[in-house]
């Protein structure tokens, strides 16, 4: 169930240049059921900035009623969000959308998780849940440069983790699609910038690929038609409520 | 207590004068997961056109200071599906529907209005002659008084329910459009639609919206809406449903004092999806604190002699 | 470095294209205590009328969300005193003056324009046909294309310096006004003046401003200004000085990309009196970071083919 | 000289219902020369609220580079200001305007200071400076009710202090003009709501009376003509730069 809640900031820290990890607490967490869902955050009480900011859920701790997001502080809203300190309240609407369904794979299956930049965080919760289900997980995480890398250890604990950097300062030089793996995968999950999603879909064409899309949003709940994308059958999907995660074949990007 | 909010308008017996604005609430399905739609005074459904429309390419929204731009482009499933699926579903709630009708030619408007006005829960039409986001149709009907009048007449001729006309703020003289529409037989006005605006992305040097321009809504435009309602309400004798930047019960009252007899809330639903029920809950107390017994006492009070008038009476 | 900001416009050789907007800077005296006025590209002085004007009763300003309303009512000491005291004082600075001229009848405008254009430091006139805050005169000249053209012609006839016409955003079709003014001989346009707006005080149930309505300015109106400049710049071949909600160097660039060749800063001077010099200081770096060598490359880039054009050339 | 400065909040406390006392520190204080001047405060970095808020200077501590304002948190801006905690920065423009000139009276003279509500604070610094100059000071402070009274002791230390409350819950029942004093005063300074100023001017007509005016402001520095008031000679004064303090005869209110 979607709730709107003043959640309490538990911690906020810088984990890479301009990348913040923010943990919040509140009963809203109990509704978070699927990795890949997102929350819509009002970063200030002011009318400026006016709109909420969509941010993916990165980690869920049901026992502590806490969840974590990781975001890049770039524009007006996310910079204000980065100023929130422990104990402050943040207005969260969520959980929103449909995430990655870990049910798509069975125990013992092999899953490849490919994340680019700020698309990496939602894969962490997914990888955890896949692991819990006994799925064998491999990660490819693409970043610009060595300094941008975050959560390497956390992913390492969950499965083989290959880092790529555009400048080659760490891991494989190039993009996430530069990595050649000999293994066969039953399912591929990917999240990142649209050009990366396209490249991944091309490289793994014919496979079962799940992608997570981004679009400018108004309501975040499916009411305003801001965030639609076309589908192959000339229909449309709303990224905020039908997605953000789709089977690659479902949508035209 | 909420008795202080009951309002009668042509075709509409409202338990309260608060309703979501067209295009900001879809057909209510999403919000029905958040609260009971029967709580609302009415619902203005998304603009419906004769044929289904996909709308404009994305990005369709952009944020501005205390406002937002949208260029949805009237995406909707078309008259047939709205009649067959959306309106019957909405009929499970105890809330009158104001059906917003859009088109690209007079005939579209007329045909859509005729059909949709037959739906049992549609208690009024809202004629959208002010959408800035479609190439042809919409706004050109709303900037020329004569055309606006003709369209109103044609739709009045076929509609089974009262017709409200939604005015565009992008005009030199909104009073003359309002009068024209009134003389065309409109039962009421709704105002304002969005102001045409644009944002440009510095990195790409291109407009942020794929459609280039979009409609500006939200708190930024509230003073423009207040001014126009203040001017129009003094020059027509049909009621006005006011909108443009409403986010709080205080805003609602400001619109009433300007001359509105009911209000719609648009953009604020995105910021706080519970805004309509919250306003409905807080409005009675605000009225009391300001010494009013009924919200209708407020209509036009900024310009009326107080003795003279206590709100629109049907 | 600041060479990237040098701009030539009709009558104006500007060291940079940043100037305070008329009415937001008086005649510069107060700001001269804060920084060296010679730093500015130009100064648009407060609207000057033939006779002194006291203006409207107070309150004259009201805050709105991300904006403000004003109804000063063109208070100014009148042509004689401006010529005798303000302009000579301003001549002690190395900064061209754009004299904003207002009136209530064609003759006033002509007489004021004729005289004030003789002042040695007045390098251009700005014809205010868009003030929403005076009963007669001002805005009615700005909403009818024919009247706007006639006034422009009459003023051009007598002015010793190039004439810029200041357009009102409160019109259905700003492009047609702009074209009319161009055909009347205008050397440039300045846009936009304020949108007409109102706020109502809940406690008194009366408008906050004594004048009831006022002009809406500030960040709230920026998307409207951008849209209008985008539309007008594609349809005229005279340069545009853009304004409406500018507060930062980024805003300045957005106006250039829309089609402006210089900009004016109004309301932001009240929020941060040092805003003009701060923008002038930060603009070169912003240009560099976006890959531009000169700000004139940006003019109209949101709609021009890049090869085609590199800014207005006199 | 007028400066714009990010000043540091030293303390903020509630001293009566909705009335806050805020002390800030910064070099700007060195320009504060006259009691009755004001500062123009930007309460947030957001464009909403947009305009600065004019607030009178209440106490100046040149040695510590600190000054104090006292204000009522009522509207959007002042409520935000009330949230500022010690250590935070506040954007202050000032000092602005022309205050009460303590030079108007000589050693041994008698001054009557009449303040109403939130017009009381600027009289504190004035009274101090008059005391330093050896002037004999009497205060009449008008408030709605006993709970609203603040700074009684501070004024008591500086001279005889008569409190009036509208409901009679403390001191004299009624308004500041209900107080009848047998003494003759050489000069009267008053600050408060306009109806009170008018009543004071009437009661003490013929005396040397200084009044402090309020008006909605734009720039606060004399450039925008938002805050004018008429003068008896058909001219005008700008409250922000010619005032806010005027000789009673100078202005029409
Ligand atoms: C479903 C979804 C999940 C996301 N998850 C994350 C995440 O986990 N971490 C993260 O750093 N970012 C994520 N994003 C992107 C994030 O929403 C934007 O970076 C953020 O909204 C930008 O806000 P701002 O205040 O920095 O920028 P501003 O420039 O101030 O934003 C202006 C407006 O544009 C919108 N906007 C700007 N960039 C984007 C964008 N890329 N996508 C959607 N809207 C945008 C803003 O929401 C706002 O309405 C996600 C986006 C979506 C749609
Ligand atoms: C020279 C001067 C000195 C002042 N000194 C003090 C003081 O020491 N303590 C104190 O509590 N108040 C003082 N005031 C009044 C104070 O400025 C207002 O109470 C304050 O601006 C209200 O802001 P807000 O955010 O609470 O209200 P909002 O309603 O959000 O204000 C909206 C707009 O109206 C303006 N405004 C509202 N009320 C007033 C008012 N009474 N006077 C001027 N502008 C107003 C605001 O500045 C703002 O621009 C002074 C006013 C002036 C002109
Ligand atoms: C995303 C969005 C979509 C809209 N779609 C419609 C529409 O389909 N038909 C219509 O008449 N108005 C539409 N509007 C205009 C609103 O109904 C309303 O008139 C306007 O937004 C001003 O109110 P607000 O400031 O409360 O949003 C839309 C507004 C927004 C923000
Ligand atoms: C207080 C105030 C006074 C103004 N006075 C004038 C004026 O005398 N003449 C004029 O042409 N424009 C006047 N304007 C309009 C501005 O020059 C400018 O066009 C408008 O405010 C939009 O710019 P901004 O949003 O940067 O303020 C005034 C604006 C304000 C806020
Ligand atoms: S953001 Fe409103 S429908 Fe998706
Ligand atoms: S506030 Fe601008 S002149 Fe006084």
Image: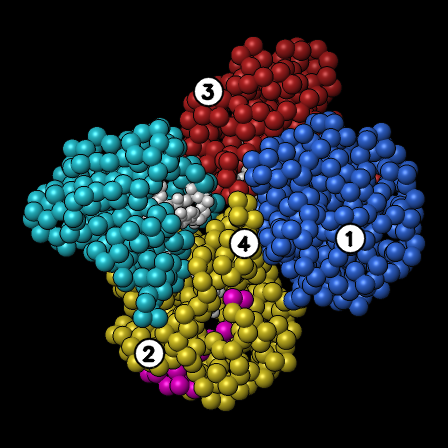
Chain colours: A red, B blue, C yellow, D cyan
Secondary element under disc 4, as helix, strand or loop, is loop
Question: Which residue position is annotated with label 2?
Answer: C81
Picture disc at residue A10: 3
Secondary element under disc 3, as helix, strand or loop, is strand
Quarter of the picture holding the C terminus of chain D: bottom left
Position of residue C290 measured from the top left corner of the image (x, y, whole percent): 46, 54
- Confirm whether residue D217 shows in the render: yes
Is residue C117 covered in magenta?
yes
What is the chain letter for disc 3? A
Identify which residue is drawn at 80% across, 68% down. Answer: B146
How far apart, in angstroms, are the residues tagged by discs 1 and 4?
A: 24 Å
Position of residue D147 measured from the top left corner of the image (x, y, whole percent): 35, 28
What is the chain letter for disc 2? C
Question: Which residue position is annotated with label 1?
Answer: B188
Quarter of the picture holding the N terminus of chain D: bottom left
How far apart, in angstroms, are the residues tagged by discs 4 and 3?
A: 45 Å
Residues marked 2 and 1, same chain: no
């Amino acid at each position: 169930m979607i709730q709107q809640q003043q959640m309490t900031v538990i911690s906020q820290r810088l984990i890479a240049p301009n990348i913040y990890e923010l943990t919040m607490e509140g009963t809203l967490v109990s509704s978070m059921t699927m990795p890949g869902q997102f929350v819509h955050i009002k970063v200030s009480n002011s009318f400026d900035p006016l709109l909420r900011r969509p941010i993916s859920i990165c980690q869920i701790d049901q026992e502590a009623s806490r969840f974590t997001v990781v975001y890049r502080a770039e524009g007006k809203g996310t910079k204000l969000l980065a100023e929130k300190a422990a104990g402050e309240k943040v207005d969260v609407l969520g959980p929103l959308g449909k995430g990655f369904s870990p049910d798509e794979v069975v125990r013992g299956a092999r899953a490849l998780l490919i994340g680019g930049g700020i698309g990496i965080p939602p894969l962490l919760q997914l990888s955890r849940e896949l692991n819990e289900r006994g799925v064998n997980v491999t990660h490819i995480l693409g970043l610009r440069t060595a300094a941008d890398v975050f959560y390497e250890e956390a992913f390492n604990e969950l499965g083989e983790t290959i880092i790529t950097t555009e400048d080659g300062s760490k891991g494989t030089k190039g993009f996430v699609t530069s990595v050649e793996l000999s293994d066969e995968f039953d399912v591929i999950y990917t999240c990142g910038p649209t050009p990366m999603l396209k490249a991944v879909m091309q490289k793994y064409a014919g496979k079962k690929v799940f992608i997570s899309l981004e679009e400018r949003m108004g309501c975040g709940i499916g009411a305003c038609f801001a965030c639609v994308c076309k589908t192959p059958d000339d229909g449309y999907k709303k990224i905020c409520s039908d997605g953000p995660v789709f089977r690659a074949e479902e949508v035209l990007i | 207590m909420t008795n202080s909010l009951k309002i009668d308008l042509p075709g509409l017996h409202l338990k309260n004068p608060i309703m979501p604005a067209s295009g900001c609430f879809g057909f209510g399905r999403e919000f029905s997961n958040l609260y009971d739609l029967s709580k609302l005074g009415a619902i203005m459904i998304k603009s419906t056109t004769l044929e289904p429309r996909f709308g404009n390419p994305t990005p369709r929204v952009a944020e501005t200071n205390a406002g937002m731009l949208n260029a949805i482009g009237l995406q909707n499933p078309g008259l047939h599906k709205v009649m067959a699926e959306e309106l019957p579903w909405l009929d499970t709630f105890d809330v009158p529907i104001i059906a917003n009708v859009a088109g690209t030619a007079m005939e579209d408007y007329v045909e859509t209005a005729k059909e949709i006005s037959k739906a049992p829960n549609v208690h009024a039409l809202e004629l959208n002659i002010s959408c800035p986001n479609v190439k042809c149709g919409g706004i050109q009907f709303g900037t020329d008084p004569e055309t606006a009048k003709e369209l109103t007449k044609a739709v009045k001729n076929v509609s089974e329910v009262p017709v409200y006309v939604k005015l565009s703020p992008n005009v030199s003289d909104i009073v003359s459009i309002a009068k024209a529409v009134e003389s065309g037989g409109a039962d009421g006005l709704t105002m304002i639609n969005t102001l045409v605006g644009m944002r440009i992305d510095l990195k790409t040097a291109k407009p942020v919206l794929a459609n280039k321009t979009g409609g500006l809504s939200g708190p930024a435009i509230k003073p423009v809406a207040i001014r126009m309602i203040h001017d129009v309400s003094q020059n027509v004798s049909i009621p006005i449903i006011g909108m443009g930047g409403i986010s709080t019960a205080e805003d609602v009252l400001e619109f009433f004092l300007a001359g509105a007899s009911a209000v719609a809330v648009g953009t604020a639903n995105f910021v706080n999806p519970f805004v309509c029920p919250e306003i409905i809950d807080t409005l009675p107390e605000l009225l009391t604190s300001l010494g009013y017994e009924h919200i209708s006492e407020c209509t036009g009070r900024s310009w009326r002699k107080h003795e003279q008038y206590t709100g629109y009476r049907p």
